[in-house]
Image (tube, rainbow, N blue to C red):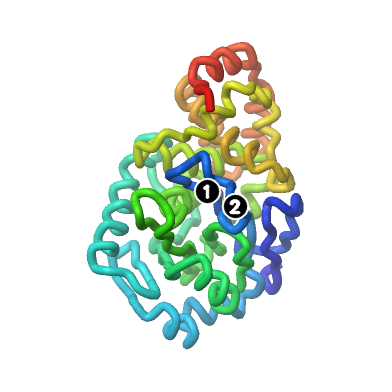
Amino acid sequence: MRATAIATALLTAALAVAPTQAAHAAPADPQPEHAFADPAQRPAHGTAKSTLATTAAAGGGKLESRILPLLHTCSPTLRIRAQEMTSAQLTATCASLANQDAFFHDVVGDSGPVADDRNTTLEVDVFNSSADYKAYAGRIYGIDTNNGGMYLEGDPSRTGNQPRFICYERTDVSPGWQIWNLNHEYTHYLDGRFDLYGDFNASQSTPTVWWGEGIAEYVSYSYRGVPYTSALAEAGRHTYSLRTVFDTTYANSNVNRTYNWGYLATRYMIERHPSDVATVLAHYRTGNWAAARAHLTSLDYEADWNAWLTSVATSS
Ligand SMILES: [Zn+2]
């Protein structure tokens, strides 16, 4: 259904989705020990509430133009719409995203966009603060804003579809200014275009959260060279079997399981079992979700998984 959809915080443990506009949000936190300290920054999964909002926005709605007047073109495939950003901030943001492309493609080993994906250009919509995001993003884009930002993939097969991620600036973080979740959300865009056939809902027909959120966290932290302290501390607790992490869905309310353990499972598979990753991604890229799921559930790496968790664990 395209007309209505409801954004749902992961913390509510509910996935009230009947949408085509889907989103991801998560903590790409430079201070991992504080990743979930503020409920407003916690990750959410949501969807646009109405196509009216997104359609109006895509056409340059008046409120969007008034609140986000700054339009900056990074490249033919990427533009930023913002409340206020300096030229230095725009340049740095464009560079951070542009340079992430090669890193991502090296990790996932794709051979180009998946079939029927027309999400050639991305818009990044940047509010000045969490308060501005809460005040305006719901009205402009039809999303819930009790979260740390959202990626709206839309229907990638539709000509004229505009994928966008909606985010905000933070100045209460190290190194002093950043667009919150920038590289995590950008990974969702790349993953949706190069790894996951169809729209977001299609990718949820079997449990794929381990990969979707895991690769977003993996690329965000490893690309930036930031240690994912909270995840490495979680590793030492051996909380979940690999199979349990493979079973994670957005109905799961435990953010550590979704993000920290998604990261750990994805990193483990990339480091230790790249051929399995290639097999699973080949199925994801053609929308053969059941085959991917069957492959994942046929694996038995639990002993090696636990040894690996011990090897990467740090004390927190
Ligand atoms: Zn995410």
Element on which disc 1 rests: loop
**Picture quarter with the N terminus:** bottom right
Question: Farthest residue in the bottom direction?
Answer: 62
Q: Do labels 1 and 2 touch, CB within 8 Å? A: yes
Label 2, residues with CA under 10 Å away: few <14, some 14-19, many ≥20: many
To which residue does mark 2 refer?
A: 42
Residue 129 image offset from top left, x and y in percent: 46, 67
Marker count (numbered):
2
Element on which disc 2 rests: loop
Label 1, residues with CA under 10 Å away: few <14, some 14-19, many ≥20: many
Relative depth, front residue between 33 and 169: 33
In the depicted structure, whether residue 157 falls above or below residue 258: below
Relative depth, front residue between 105 and 131: 131
In the depicted structure, whether residue 225 falls above or below residue 232: below
Say which residue appears at 52% left-offset and 21% top-offset: 313
Mark sitting on residue 205: none
In the depicted structure, whether residue 300 falls above or below residue 10: above
Q: Earlier in the sequence, mark 1 or mark 2?
A: 1
Say which residue appears at 67% left-offset and 25% top-offset: 239
Residue 30, located in which quarter of the rendered image?
top left
Compute the Cα span from label 1 to label 2.
Answer: 6 Å
Name the side, left or right, on which 23 lies relative to 124. Answer: right
> Is residue 16 at least partly visible in the picture?
yes
> Is residue 54 at least partly visible in the picture?
no
Say which residue appears at 43% left-offset and 36% top-offset: 108
To which residue does mark 1 refer?
A: 27
Residue 102, located in which quarter of the rendered image?
top left
Residue labelled 2 has its Cβ within 8 Å of some atom of ligand 1? no
Residue kind at label 2, given as amino acid type: Arg
